[in-house]
Amino acid sequence: MFKMVEVFKTNVLDVERSNLLVERLLFHFPDNKINFDLQDCDKILRVEGENILSGRIMELLNEEGHVCEILD
């Protein structure tokens, strides 16, 4: 099984908020490993798994009022 990694730039600022977002994302993508790096200047969201639906991940964060785009 091949694992993919996708890295997103976000505007999530605090740990409490990031924890809620990780919970919501894991609800939709329970087989993925998901975490934030809020120490990074781009407030990184990192998703690891076999099947990453980047568009849906960005959509879910947008619905929560956050900016989320794939980091090049």
Image (cartoon, helix red, strand yellow):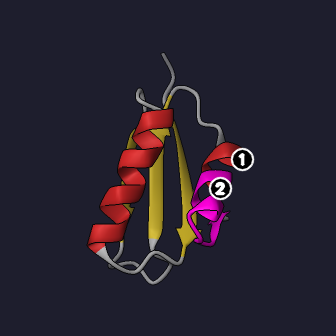
Q: Which residue is mark 1?
A: 55
Q: What is the quadrant of residue 32 in the picture?
A: top left
Mark 2 closeness class: few <14, some 14–19, many ≥20 residues within 10 Å: some
**Camera-side residue of 47 and 17:** 17
Tag 2 secondary structure: helix
Q: Are marks 2 and 1 in contact (CB under 8 Å)?
A: yes
Residue displayed at 36% across by 47% down: 23
Could you tell me the amino acid type at mark 1? Gly
Q: Position of residue 24 (x, y in %)?
A: 43, 47
Q: Separation of disc 2 and disc 1 at Cα?
A: 5 Å
Residue displayed at 47% across by 60% down: 45
**Camera-side residue of 11 and 27:** 27
Residue 58 located left or right of residue 41: right
Residue 68 located left or right of residue 19: right
Q: Please state the extent of the stretch shown in magenta in the rendering.
A: 59-71
Quarter containing the C terminus: bottom right
Q: Position of residue 65 (x, y in %)?
A: 59, 71
Q: Is residue 25 magenta?
A: no
Could you tell me the amino acid type at mark 2? Met
